[in-house]
Amino acid sequence: MKSVADPDEAELVRRIACGDRVAFDELYRRTSPWLAVRLRRRCADDDVIAEVLQETYLAVWRAAGSYAGSVTEGSAVGWLWTIAANRLVDAFRRRARHERVPTIALVETTVPAAEDEVMANRVDQNVEQALLRLPTELRQVLQAMVLDDLSVRQTAVLLSIPEGTVKTRARRARIALREALS
């Protein structure tokens, strides 16, 4: 009989979908250190990291049944990273909403001119609009590679497409963005 250490992550997720707590513990043991390191590359606040990890694994427990695990190696880890990255973005948004407090300059600082703030907001809006105009398949690749910092291989596994297609779509997305923003 196989021990719980033998199955790959995809099999562990499938077992979690059936309510297997031992499989959940094993998935957590295998992936949480790696996931914490990846999250720390994007956020230095240990409290936020701990919150995101907790929310991620809670989501895994609740949504394991929706995992459409393929036979491609590493796809469960890509699925897990996508959940964590989305939870991190949510945490940043919550923090931004709660921290919108007027800042008081205690030390001499240069306050940006109103024109600079307007231009910065306008540039952000232009980039956002350009991203929204991209075809979905190009936007997904860009999000995975740029925002989630996944490699070409990881992106290919996550999106279930060949690595060459990932490279082509990334190039097409960058060209389209460059044209939209010029």
Image (spheres, grey):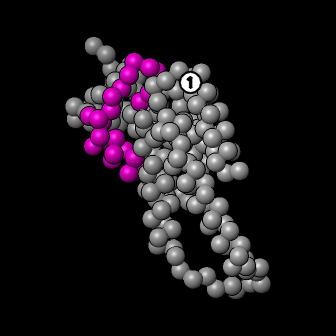
Q: Is residue 56 magenta?
A: yes
Q: Main secondary structure of the magenta part?
A: helix
Q: Quadrant of residue 146?
A: top right
Say which amino acid is labelled 1: Thr
Residue 133 image point, x, y percent? 52, 47
Binning the other alpha carbons within 10 Å of mark 1 as few (below 14), some (14 to 19) or many (20 upward) gives few
For this view, does 8 lie left or right of residue 180?
left
Residue 50 image point, x, y percent? 46, 54
Q: Is residue 37 visible?
A: no
Q: Residue at x 47, y 31 (%)?
A: 158
For this view, does 136 lie left or right of residue 152?
left
Q: How many marks?
A: 1
Find the magenta span and give its range: 53-76
Q: Residue furthest top?
A: 1
> Between 26 and 42, which is closer to the camera in this rendering?
42
Quarter of the image where the N terminus is located = top left
Q: Residue at x 27, y 43 (%)?
A: 62
Q: Residue at x 37, y 44 (%)?
A: 57
Q: Is residue 174 visible?
A: yes
Q: Is the residue 124 above or below the residue 13 in the image? A: below
Q: Quadrant of residue 175?
A: top right
Q: Residue furthest left?
A: 18
For this view, does 143 lie left or right of residue 179?
left
For this view, does 8 lie left or right of residue 129?
left
Q: Secondary structure at mark 1?
A: helix
Residue 169 image point, x, y percent? 58, 31
> Between 79 and 54, which is closer to the camera in this rendering?
79
Q: Residue at x 55, y 54 (%)?
A: 129
> Between 174 and 93, which is closer to the camera in this rendering?
174
Q: Which residue in the protein does label 1 denote?
A: 165
Q: Is residue 71 magenta?
A: yes
Residue 13 image point, x, y percent? 33, 31
